[in-house]
Amino acid sequence: MREMLEDVACNICGSRESVPFLSMGRFVYRKCTRCGLVYQNPRPVFHALRNRYKDNYFSYELQNQENFFHLMKLGLNDIRFDRFYRDSGVGKTFLDIGCATGLLLNDMKNKGWKTKGVEICRESAEYGIKRFGLDIFIGTIEEASLPDQYFDVVHLSHLIEHVPDPRSLLLEVKRILKPGGHMVLTTPNVDGFQARVSRERWRSAIPDHIYLFAKKTMRVLLERTQFHVIKQVSWGGIPVGRGPKVLKLPADRLAKYFNIGDVMLFHCTHA
Ligand SMILES: [Zn+2]
């Protein structure tokens, strides 16, 4: 069945002026001429997007869960997450939006955190609920209507590029985050070395990514939703399986050093 499409304005600045950025055949990314945000336009309406996160998506999540969990842990180590919670997270509240099968939540729960997950893919959420006994809301963060100023940490890994309205997502995170609480967010970097070299062949230029953020555009969005960036890092020089193996380690180191990595992480608090 063909997905119904809609035309949208820039989610950061509201402008409708844009120029073609990447032409993927089935879909097109455009770049806002005012603020530089890269986004699919036109794009599938929300119920069409939502329909994508079914059993096929669950299979993908399940197949990759260990790998994704490993990468999330590396990200948290990178910002020395544990240092912020030296006395461990016992009794503290941790929300993972887009928690998939719940491996990270389960790990945090085992460390004493009070955890909550939000996941739009029913099959993934049910796996986490049954397998690990996790508390996962099935749906969107807005539908979850969580209490004000409740969470010490909100974690969003590879989520924001999938949602139709990133600005409202961040405002919702801000509302439910405690004063002094932390948000940790990761997303592919359209301004990174890989994206620049690969263009249409970039592994993150895929139908489910309706936004492709760069360091600059993400910073503007965070500023406008009143988040303060404590730390920003990026990693990933050459993807596994592309390019000579011997170049991977030095390329990864350079990408990180120059902050032109393939995936970027923002560690934030309320501004
Ligand atoms: Zn814009």
Image (spheres, helix red, strand yellow):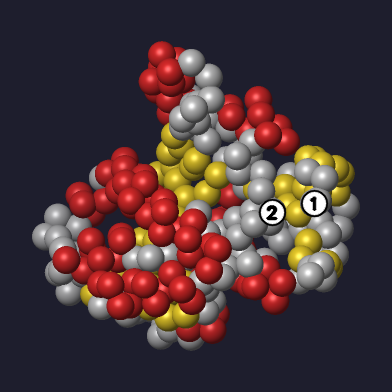
Q: Secondary structure at mark 1?
A: loop
Q: Is residue 65 visible?
A: yes
Place of residue 40 in the rendered image (x, y in percent of width and height, measured from the top left): 76, 54
Residue 265 located left or right of residue 203: left
Place of residue 208 in the rendered image (x, y in percent of width and height, measured from the top left): 64, 57
- Identity of the residue drawn at 63% across and 67% down: 52
Quarter of the rendering containing residue 177: bottom left
Residue 56 located left or right of residue 182: right
Q: Which residue type carries mark 2? A: Pro
Quarter of the rendering containing residue 128: bottom left
Q: Contact (CB < 8 A) between labels 1 and 2? A: yes
**Towards the viewer: 94 or 130:** 130
* Residue hosting label 1: 27
**Is residue 106 shown above or below 77?**
below
Q: Within 8 Å of ligand 1, the CB of disc 1?
A: no
Q: Secondary structure at mark 2?
A: loop
Place of residue 204 in the rendered image (x, y in percent of width and height, measured from the top left): 61, 43
- Identity of the residue drawn at 41% across and 14% down: 246
**Disc number at residue 183?**
none
**Is residue 123 shown above or below 157?**
below
Place of residue 194 in the rendered image (x, y in percent of width and height, measured from the top left): 59, 29
Quarter of the rendering containing residue 77: top left
Q: Within 8 Å of ligand 1, the CB of disc 2?
A: no
- Identity of the residue drawn at 71% across and 61% down: 11
* Residue hosting label 2: 207
Label 1 environment density (alpha carbons within 10 Å; few <14, some 14–19, many ≥20): some
**Is residue 176 shown above or below 34?**
below
> Which mark sits nearer the N-terminus, 1 or 2?
1
